[in-house]
Structure formats: structure tokens, C-alpha cells
Image (cartoon, rainbow, N blue to C red):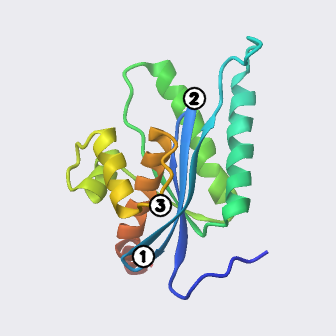
Amino acid sequence: MQRITPQNTVRIIGLDPGLNHTGWGVIDAAGNSLHYIACGRITTAAKTDTLQVNTMGERLSTLYTALKTIIETHMPVEAAVEETFVNKNALSALKLGMARGVVMLAPAHAGLEVSEYAANVVKKSISGYGHADKNQVAQMVKMLMPSADLQSPDAADALAIAVCHAHHRASNQMLKGMRA
């Protein structure tokens, strides 16, 4: 099934990686015009309601399967992922790195080009301030896309990542052309 959109419109999925919660947000961008499509949060709990422990493999598989379904449903053509910061706890950093790998793999496996943005670049693109807090980012996302249903801070962050990519994609493409 092929998605039909107006010419010069690109559908972007923004992804905010995390092992416990991964935010996702889909927008359509045409020039400076942004249109909210959908957003949400994928949760991979270490323990279920029955206190059964989910292994790391099960959690990563849940994350991949959910992302695959979201990509198949909304049919984005480009993906943007937030880069992670260095964590002082080595085990936490390793677990986040595994989740981030899955978050990057799912869109790449679907044939999408995956771009990465540092958190302060995302925040500056949205709010004009690279150290904005989550509340400020969510408020700006809501101002840019009033119809957005910000179900969680993770979803708001993911939409912010998609908006950041929409703002930077032209210059990214120009740089790729210069390298080629």
C-alpha cells in the first residue's frame, strides 16, 4: 500500500529511545508547514502485572515489534532519533544503548533513512533554547501543532525530534550532496 500525500510533503517519524519507555511521533512536513499525524509511547516493562520477569531479549523484541507496526501503519519515509547522553551508570548506559540500537534498526530495516540529533539541538530547534526543560518542549510542540495529542512526555519529545528533523533536513541533504 502506498501513501498518497501532496507533492513536496514528507512524512517523518521522530523517536525518543528508552528501554522502559520509547516515545514516537509522526508528522507531515511541507516546507515550514507541519501537520500532526499521531504519537504515543511504547512501554517495555521489566515485570508484568503478574510479576513475571521479562528478559532483556523479550523487552527488545517488544520494542522492535511495536516500532515495526507503527512504521507499517503510518508509513513515514524518514526517521529521526535523539542521540543519547553519556550516563554515569555503565549498566544503565548499556541497556539504553541496546534499546537505542533497536530504535535505529526498526526504521532502517523498513528502508527509512535515519538521522540523529543531540538533545540540545532538538530543544533549540523547538524552543530556541538548548537547555529547555521537558515542559517547555511540550508547550512549544503544542503551539506548533495544536491538534497534537501529547499522551506522555516521551511522545512530546518524539514529536519535537520529528519537528527538529523537518527543520534540518534540507541542510542535511545539501551536506550529503556535497560529500558525494
Kindly identify which residue carries mark 2.
Answer: 20
Q: Nearer the viewer, residue 100 or 141?
A: 141
Q: What amino acid is labelled 1 in the image?
A: Gln
Measure the C-alpha gap from mark 1 to mark 2.
Answer: 33 Å
Mark 2 and mark 3 lie on one chain; the one further toward the N terminus is 2
- Disc 1: CA contacts within 10 A as few (<14), some (14-19) or many (>=20): few
Work out whether residue 52 can be spotted.
Answer: yes
Question: Residue 161 appears in which quarter of the rendering?
Answer: bottom left
What residue lies at 52% left-to-right and 41% top-to-bottom? 17
Kindly identify which residue carries mark 3.
Answer: 147
Measure the C-alpha gap from mark 1 to mark 3.
Answer: 29 Å
Kindly identify which residue carries mark 1.
Answer: 173
Q: What amino acid is labelled 3 in the image?
A: Ser
Mark 1 and mark 2 lie on one chain; the one further toward the N terminus is 2
Q: Secondary structure at mark 2?
A: loop
80, above or below 178, in the image:
above
Q: What amino acid is labelled 2 in the image?
A: Asn
Across and down, in percent, residue 125 comes to: 29, 59
Which mark's residue is nearer the viewer, 1 or 2? 2
Which mark's residue is nearer the viewer, 2 or 3? 3
Q: Secondary structure at mark 3?
A: loop
